[in-house]
Amino acid sequence: MSTHSSHPDIIKRLKRAEGHLRSIIDMMETNRGCLDVAQQLQAVESAIANAKRVLIHDHIDHCLDHAMQGDGKDSANAVREFKEITKYL
């Protein structure tokens, strides 16, 4: 599997979410208010969902498009993989 141009950005987003998640754990261990914790959880959830969306769109734009230009076997595999990845949308 090759690295796509979007992967460094996705990694950056996930590392940021990882840091926020650690902060949330600290917030809970120090008995911060539920509203503050819930807001931070929403931010982490949104960051992960956005990273997933970028990854899937990148896959469709690059991997699927490239495979569809190949032979019949590549195209069939690309369609199968596309069907599989859509369950994560």
Image (spheres, rainbow, N blue to C red):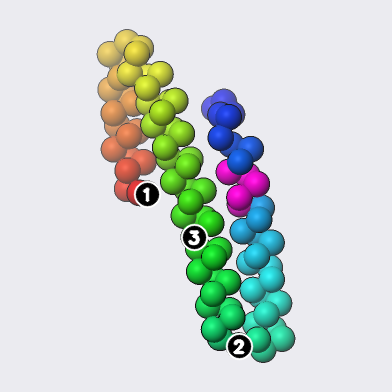
The residue singled out by tag 2 in the image is: 33
Q: Residues within 10 Å of mark 1 (few under 14, many from 20)?
A: few
Which of pointers 1 and 2 lies earlier in the amino acid sequence? 2
The residue drawn where x is 54% and y is 84% is: 35
Q: Which residue is mark 3?
A: 46
The three-letter amino acid code for the residue at tag 2 is Gly
Residue at numbered disc 1: 88
Rendered residue at 68%/68% (across/down): 22
State the CA–CA distance, disc 3 to disc 2: 20 Å
**Element under label 3?**
helix
Residue 73 screen position, x and y as percent? 31, 16
Residue pictured at 29% horizontal, 38% vertical: 83
Number of the front mark, 1 or 3: 3
Question: How far is mark 1 from mark 2, CA to CA?
Answer: 32 Å
CB atoms at circles 1 and 3 under 8 Å apart?
Answer: no
The percent coordinates of residue 77 (x first, y second) are 33, 25
Residue 72: percent from the left, percent from the top? 28, 13
Q: Earlier in the sequence, mark 3 or mark 2?
A: 2
Residue 39 lies left or right of residue 88; in this view the side is: right
In the rendered image of this protein, does residue 3 appear above or below residue 66? below
Residue type, label 3:
Ser
